[in-house]
Amino acid sequence: QVQVVEYGGGLVQAGGSLTLSCVVSGGSFSSYAMGWYRQATGKEREFVAAVNWNGRSTYYADSVKGRFTISRDNAKDTTTLQMDGLKPEDTAVYYCNADTQPGLNSGSWGPGTQVTVSS
């Protein structure tokens, strides 16, 4: 059974940076596309970023393009979301996702980690 766990959420001021990490166990990490989604209070979960199985293709929501960077290390079964230039509207619970293809909004999910950006 695949298990997904996120690390690294917290509170940061607007303009600051945070790094989220995600570790996958119980499966073949290098076979998964990895992604990050987020859900703000009262809103639906939305796509943030994804990376394909070998790290050569990345995908971003328009709202984070140029500020967030997704990467992966298949040797460590880890994917990372570097978030720079954070804005209050980035406040949400962030979920890591492992799936067969990027951006499908399906597959295996972590429990989520809270990111709060203060103005």
Image (cartoon, helix red, strand yellow):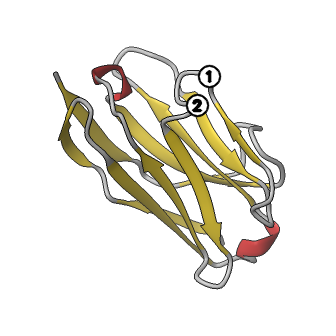
Q: Compare residues 8 and 26 and report the one nearer the observer.
A: 8
**Quadrant where the C terminus is found in the figure:** top left
The count of marks equals: 2
Badge 2 amino acid: Lys
Q: Position of residue 31 (x, y in %)?
A: 82, 69
**Quadrant where the N terminus is found in the figure:** bottom right
Which residue is identified by label 1? Answer: 62
> Residue at image x 62%, y 41%?
49
Judging from the image, what secondary structure is the residue with disc 2 in?
A: loop
**On screen, residue 15 above or below 56:** above
> Residue at image x 36%, y 31%?
92
Q: Are marks 2 and 1 in contact (CB under 8 Å)?
A: yes
Badge 1 amino acid: Asp
> Residue at image x 36%, y 34%?
85
Please identify the residue farthest to the top as the structure is shown: 42
- The crowding category of the residue bearing disc 2, from other C-alpha atoms within 10 Å (few below 14, some 14 to 19, many at least 20), is few
Q: Position of residue 23 (x, y in %)?
A: 52, 70
Judging from the image, what secondary structure is the residue with disc 1 in?
A: loop
Please identify the residue farthest to the bottom as the structure is shown: 75
- The crowding category of the residue bearing disc 1, from other C-alpha atoms within 10 Å (few below 14, some 14 to 19, many at least 20), is few
Residue 97 image label: none
Judge left or right: residue 73 versus residue 53.
Answer: left
Tell me how far mark 2 sits from mark 1, CA to CA.
5 Å
> Residue at image x 74%, y 38%?
103
Q: Position of residue 66 (x, y in %)?
A: 55, 34
Residue 59 is drawn in which quadrant? top right
Residue 94 is drawn in which quadrant? top left
Residue 63 is drawn in which quadrant? top right
**On screen, residue 8 above or below 14:** below
Q: Position of residue 22 (x, y in %)?
A: 49, 63
Which residue is identified by label 2? Answer: 65
Judge left or right: residue 89 versus residue 96.
Answer: left
